[in-house]
Image (cartoon, rainbow, N blue to C red):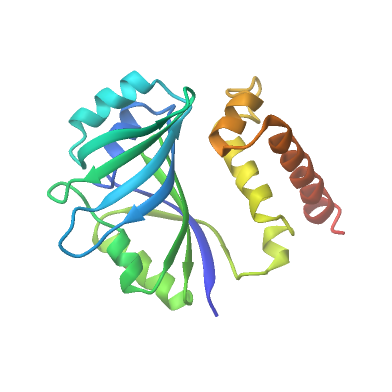
Amino acid sequence: MSVIAEFTIHAPTLALTPTLEAVPEMTVELDQQMVAQGYTPLVIVWASGGDFTAFDTALETDTTIASHAIIEDLDTRKLYRLELSRSDLQEVYPAYQNVGAIPMAGHGKAGVWRRRIRFPDRDALGDFQQFCTEKTIDFSLKRLYTPGDDDTTFQLTEPQLEALVAAYEVGYFNVPRDATLEELSSKLGISKQSVSERLRRAQSRLVSNAILGK
């Protein structure tokens, strides 16, 4: 049976690590990732929450990035097209392919990538962890569950889980808050009302299922 793993990985040669460490307040969300044999690896990411001038400057000297371009500029959120540099890059995507894994989501901040990946079984996850050890990539498993396992997902829908994770990562739950509801809605690409509703419903389910045990 397949398993879904949520984990963090970190290494100086992972894509965008130098830039994310130089601008630690910036969050990038993986939109697309394209790797084909004989071609330059390409990723499309949304960036938000930080200084875009500093981010662009850091990209210029990032040895893991061969070239970059802004595809969409929404003021508080920008979509970047990044060509990766094979010479200074530790590629991870081929390792997913080798074990039959399917990338589902990815966020990067302060030099650390948080990934959600579907593995065909636990052995495949173990093979990927071994790959990380051999390549000196810091790997930390945060969550492991099977598809449809309500006991571990607390019956949250995917949009609700996405909203909660995004809110946590941008500091929306901090006291005082590091991000506004408007900034969170921009990151998720939905209205403020939709974000507010998702967060309320997600928090209600968490209390009901995780605390009250209903």
The residue under the point 72% across, 65% down is 150
Tell me which residue sits at (36%, 26%) in the image.
23
Would residue 82 be found to the left or right of residue 163 on screen?
A: left
Q: Return the x and y of residue 78 as percentages of the image width and height.
A: 42, 31
Image-based side of 164 in relation to 5, left or right: right
Q: Position of residue 194 (x, y in %)?
A: 71, 38
Residue 43, position as x, y percentages in the image:
32, 48
User: Residue 15 is drawn in which quadrant?
Assistant: top left
Quadrant of residue 28 within the rendered picture: top left
- Is residue 171 visible in the rendered structure shown here? no
Looking at this rendering, what residue extends furthest in the bottom direction?
A: 1
Q: Residue at x 49, y 24 (%)?
A: 76
Residue 197 makes an appearance in the image: yes
Task: Tally the marks.
Answer: 0
Location of the N terminus by quadrant is: bottom right
Q: Is residue 196 left or right of residue 212?
A: left
Please identify the quarter of the rendering in which residue 73 is found.
Answer: top left
In the figure, 10 relative to 78: above or below?
Answer: below
Residue 71: % across, % down: 36, 35
Q: Nearer the viewer, residue 43 or 54?
A: 43
Of the pair 131 and 17, the residue shown nearer to us? 17
The image shows residue 153, relative to residue 178, as above or below, that is below
Q: Residue at x 33, y 19 (%)?
A: 53
Q: Quadrant of the C terminus?
A: bottom right
* Residue situated in front as seen by the camera: 37 or 16: 37
**Nearer the observer, 205 or 191:** 191
Above or below, comparing residue 114 to residue 50 in the picture:
below
